[in-house]
């Protein structure tokens, strides 16, 4: 019986790892589209946090926060923040930057 629980834990861990990779790929796609739309140079992306939330409207869902670097003038870099609910982009916050 312990083997079934061990197998379940291993499968949940693998699912979580694969899910986080898919969320990171979606975040990369959304942020690159945002940078192309506003004529910004995309530099890098990193995940700040991912956590499970419960909401009456959405039910249980994952909220992931990403930090990304971009440049508006190709010389300096700035850091923005993107939030995703599952695979969907919720918001992007960028500071003032030089064009």
Image: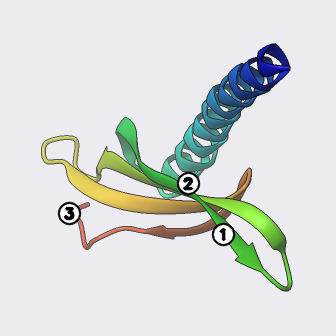
Query: Label 2, on which residue?
Result: 34
**Could you say where residue 15 lies in the image, as x and y percent from the top left?**
74, 28
**Could you say where residue 32 lies in the image, as x and y percent from the top left?**
54, 42
Query: Label 3, on which residue?
Result: 98
Q: Nearer the viewer, mark 3 or mark 2?
A: 2
Please indicate whether residue 63 sits to the left or right of residue 93 in the image: right
**Could you say where residue 25 lies in the image, as x and y percent from the top left?**
63, 33
First in sequence: mark 3 vs mark 2: 2
Query: Label 1, on which residue?
Result: 53
Q: CA–CA distance between discs 3 and 2?
A: 17 Å
Please indicate whether residue 47 sits to the left or right of residue 37 in the image: left
First in sequence: mark 3 vs mark 1: 1
Helix, strand or loop under label 1: strand
Which colour scheme appears in the figure? Answer: rainbow
Helix, strand or loop under label 2: helix
Q: Does residue 1 sit above or below 57 in this rendering?
A: above
| Residue drawn at x 48%, y 49% as measured from the top left | 35
> Front-most of 29 and 58?
58
> Front-most of 46 and 80?
46
């Amino acid at each position: 019986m312990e083997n079934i629980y061990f197998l379940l834990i291993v499968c949940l861990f693998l699912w979580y790892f694969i899910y986080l990779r898919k969320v990171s790929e979606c975040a990369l796609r959304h942020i690159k589209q945002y940078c192309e739309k506003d004529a910004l140079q995309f530099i890098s992306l990193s995940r700040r946090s991912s956590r499970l939330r419960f909401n009456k409207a959405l039910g249980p869902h994952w909220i992931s926060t990403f930090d990304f670097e971009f440049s508006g003038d190709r010389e300096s870099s700035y850091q923005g923040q993107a939030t995703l609910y599952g695979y969907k982009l919720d918001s992007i916050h960028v500071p003032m930057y030089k064009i």
